[in-house]
Image: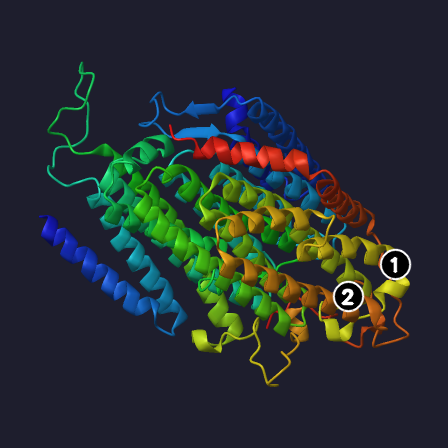
Amino acid sequence: MTVLVTSPIVIPLATAVAAAFAYRRPGLQQAISFAGILALLGCAVALVAAAIEGRPMSVSFGGWQAPFGIEFKVDRLGAIMVLLTALMGFAALLFQVGDPETNRGSTPRAAFTLPLLHGMLMGVCGAFVTADLFNMYVWFEVMLIGVLGLFAAGGRMDQLEATFKYFVLNVAGTLLLVVAVGSVYAVTGQLNYTALSEAAALLSPGMALVLLASLAVAFLVKAGAFPLFAWLPAAYHTLPGPVLALVAGLLTKVGVYALLRVYGDVFATAPEAALDVSREALGWIAAATMLTGVLGAAYHWDMRRILGFHIISQIGYMLLGIALGTDAGNGGTLFYTAHHIIVKANLFFIAAIAWRMTGSYDLRRIGGLANAKPALALVFAIPALSLVGIPPLSGFWAKLIVLREALALGHVAWTVVALAVSFLTLYSMMKIWMEAFWKPHPEPSRPIAARGLAPAWCVTAGLALITVLIGLFPETLAAYCAAAAAEIGGVP
Amino acid sequence: MIWVIALSIWATLFVGARLAMSRDVFRVVVGLALISSGIVLMLFSAGRIYTTEPAVIAAGEQALPATASNPIPQALVLTAIVIGFALVCFAFVLVVRVVRDGATDSADELRVAEPVPSDPVEPPASPSECEPPHPGSPADGGRGVRGGHRP
């Protein structure tokens, strides 16, 4: 059991090191990274299977029992997040086979894309399995270092500039996180989640509010919430296609996970007065995040930037579920996160395919895809309509669960904002549809085709199939998410 | 003692924040490094500073003596210093590349990835050197074909 709990760290670490040593041989490097991601996927499935049986799995390091030693603990929430990470990692690795941006022959920079990718996956998985607040900070840093490498690896001026902006704004967030963790330690003397939730019950409401707010601000920076999201639209669109899809799918959701963990688990026992104030604030932040994200998307014409702003907008819905403060709200957030990771990554993958076929990411310069490639139009329609929330796709159920709970608790204003944002999301998706798919290509003589896209088709079709399956059989995932929310919310 | 530490944390954070808000990209990184040092001091004092006795278990003993200092903040601080140092080193190399390739050290002029809009309604398209090189499209009219901009 110890091996299984540490596997989400050990496997990507070993893969990253082995792939780095194989940098002279691209074929071997690909083989190593596929072996690594498949092993991670297998372990993630085993973790979810064990979590469904309700066996909490934990391990403490260095011969010190929790709360003194660093503890890794995988519950239902952590297990499904690890599974989603492994799934997206596999999708991105499959997509980049034959991708011209990440495999530019044997250029030295491209050789380190795969090791950095696995290093980033290690940070993401680490944040999901750890049960120690300071350790969570360390995993956020691992993730940051990995993604900085991926940003800078291309070496173009816009990528270096994006790396710098991403670095400055994210390090500011990380420093806030260290301040918050230091304050939590100074006040409670604990860092372990279980020990902290016992200590949180004894805090005064004012002190609990200060600690909760400082942690929340740090994680809101990482999640890309209003008004702290400037790092995301400044940088994301410079990444190569498959890496962008993986980063866009996963990284902001680690911030959402951390907020869910803090609000729903660690500080769930804090005095009600402190929780009520911070939830109310989070709810309004969520509404503002949804609205600003979708309005930013409406302005842009570059597919990567439109979809980048939609990440921010969708983060708002996930935060809304956390702000509701009930088990149903937390479960809704988890359902929304699972649905969103798959759909959002798929939209970025499809944008990359459209770029390969038409020659640009800018909607003003492309077109004619619906006529030339009707299959791509179909594959685009599934995640796009799911993002909007059209039944019977996964996004409909995700929005239904969150908004039903919001209405049940009487938060009419937040619900109205969320529904209005859905319409604006539809506008953005219609814009991509009209410009990239429906109108003819501005250069009628240009052939709309690309070679070597077989792995890319497998990835997008597979992810679209998962979206449809979640949409047709939502009960399985909804029941799992509800159980996960009940598990973390259970007062020890 | 605690007041001396509080004062030094305050001074470090103040100077760091002042530098981090500068337009000079190099000063921004120095500022962040200073802020991170101030925060490390804060993290250290979070474990209460009451003794200079090292946190060492004497031979034959099973537990720390009650007079020893708290070892946990020391471990946390060490971790934070190592991570912070690595990030600052990376950032300095990055800044040197940005200044050299971008021919500017002003953060205001770093507008390659986010071009300044010229039209009140429509955003500008990315310049072609900011687009990934497109494989095999001779009919592309020259845009999106060139990549890997290295002046």
Whether residue B71 is visible, yes or no, is yes
Give SS at disc 2.
helix
User: Is residue B89 in sight in this rendering?
Assistant: no
Residue placed under numbered mark 2 in the picture: A433
Task: Quote the CA–CA distance across marks 2 and 1.
Answer: 12 Å
Which corner quadrant of the image does residue A283 belong to? Answer: bottom left
A189 lies left or right of B129: left
Q: First in sequence: mark 2 or mark 1?
A: 1
Which residue is depicted at the point 72% across and 65% down? B133
Chain letter of the residue carrying label 1:
A
In terms of secondary structure, where does tag 1 sit?
Answer: helix
- The location of residue A111, given as percent across then percent down, is 64, 49
Crowding near the residue tagged with mark 1, few <14, some 14–19, many ≥20 C-alpha atoms within 10 Å: few
Side of A335 where A212 appears, left or right: left
Residue at far left of view:
B1
Q: What amino acid does circle 2 point to?
A: Trp
2 and 1 marks on the same chain: yes
Asked whether B18 or A279 is in front, the reply is A279
* Residue, far top: B60
Q: Position of residue A82 (x, y in %)?
A: 57, 36
Which label belongs to residue A374? 1
Relative image position of residue A17 (x, y in whole percent): 56, 37
Closer to the camera, B134 or A428?
A428
Across and down, in percent, residue A94 comes to 73, 44
Tell which of B59 and A242 is nearer to you. Answer: A242
The image quadrant of residue A419 is: bottom right
Q: Exactly how many numbered labels are in the figure? A: 2
**Three-letter residue code for mark 1:** Pro
Q: Residue at x 34, y 41 (%)?
A: B79
Left or right of A308 in this view: A69: left
